[in-house]
Amino acid sequence: MFELVIFTFFLLNTVYVLILSIAGHFYKKKVVPQASKFNRIAILVPSYKEDKVILHTTTELLKLDYPKSNYDVIVIADSLEDKTIETLKKTDAIVIPVAFEKSMKSRSLNHALNHIDSSYDIAIIADADNILSKNFLNDINNLFCAGYQIIQSQRVAKNLNTPMAMLDGVSEAINNHLFRQGSNALGLSAALIGSGMAFPYKLLKEKVAKIDSVVEDRELQLALLEEGYTVTYQKGILVYDEKVESTEAYKNQRKRWIAGQYGVLKKYLVKSFVLLFKGNINFFNSAFIQNVFPSRIISLTSLLAISIVSIFIFKISGITIRWCALTLIYSFALILSTPRIFFTKKLIKSLSIIPVVFVRTIQSLFQSRNASKTFIHTEHKQREIDSTFLSK
């Protein structure tokens, strides 16, 4: 009986991923005309102890192809060194130093939104290590003027220089295919990533004012979905994001993500079903379905482990065959979701560390209990953009 319950859970997980995987191939980018006006845009860059990258990021953001008088780069300097802040102030960026007893991205954003000019039309959130493509603001402005107001851009790997960075980049690409392309293709809201996001300025200010959490992207998304807003994903508007280079860094990062995932599930469990019965499928999908199922790496390695164990315990039996079949189907869904540009010898070599990644993920799971209450900082370094996505 217990085995059947576990099998049913993973079966539903596999069916869900397979449907999104297939749907992702039917996704179509939004085709919109060149806008007749340039909206005022605020690029908000929360920066916590990011002295190594923030100067480079700010310089690159100030070079974007958009009228200089119509956009501002706003660096929210949390715990940056004095010399870094002084150098930033010599650029054309707006620098807002902040200090909190407990740092959170949501607190930085809220402080900035309450202390800057509110005449902006669009607000974009970028991380301190993010580099936006040259036409990023033009593309966002065109979509905004065409009526798409909450937009998630395509976040891609800035670096693929280690096996872990490669796997992290592949994971990002798979999630883009499943939870952004696939969701939009099915008429559902895309999932927010946490950076490379665009909102109507006043709407963001209103929603962030009510959020005090280290998983602000999840909370922000659910606050918007609850009121009937949807997120549009636009493939091709690129934001380059640094991927973690070691399994230890991966573990620390995942602790917060796992804590956030199950914290949100617990907090919104009842509300997700209440809103489902009221017809809000988007909220149910984001609050319950996407949080109740484990990550791709945990799902795949769990299926592999169960299949191997079943061979030893049950030999070649019905139980063994169905677990092995489910593992193959889940693997197929992930392969189907992986962009062809990743099918290289480098990826094959990177797959060798999956057992280590699985162990780190399990460690993250057990260490995540209080991770949602404390901001876990992932240190970034200045990296050149990998050429893989430059032509995209």
Image (cartoon, rainbow, N blue to C red):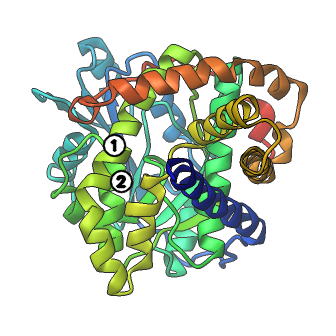
Q: Residue furthest bottom?
A: 278
Circle 2: residue type? Arg
In this orientation, does residue 237 appear?
Answer: no
In front here: 155 or 12?
12
Question: Mark 2: which secondary structure?
Answer: helix
In this orientation, does residue 360 appear?
Answer: yes
Question: Mark 1: which secondary structure?
Answer: helix
Q: Quadrant of residue 27?
A: bottom right
Q: Which residue is mark 2?
A: 218
Q: Neighbour class for label 1 at 10 Å: few (<14), some, many (≥20)?
A: many
Give whichever of discs 1 and 2 has the lower sequence position.
2
In front here: 107 or 85?
107
In front here: 90 or 349?
349
Whether the residues at callouts 1 and 2 have beta carbons within 8 Å, the answer is yes
Q: Which residue is mark 1?
A: 260
Where is 152 relative to 244, above or below? Answer: below
The x and y percentages for residue 328 are 80, 47
Q: Quadrant of residue 97?
A: top left
Circle 1: residue type? Gly
Q: Neighbour class for label 2 at 10 Å: few (<14), some, many (≥20)?
A: some
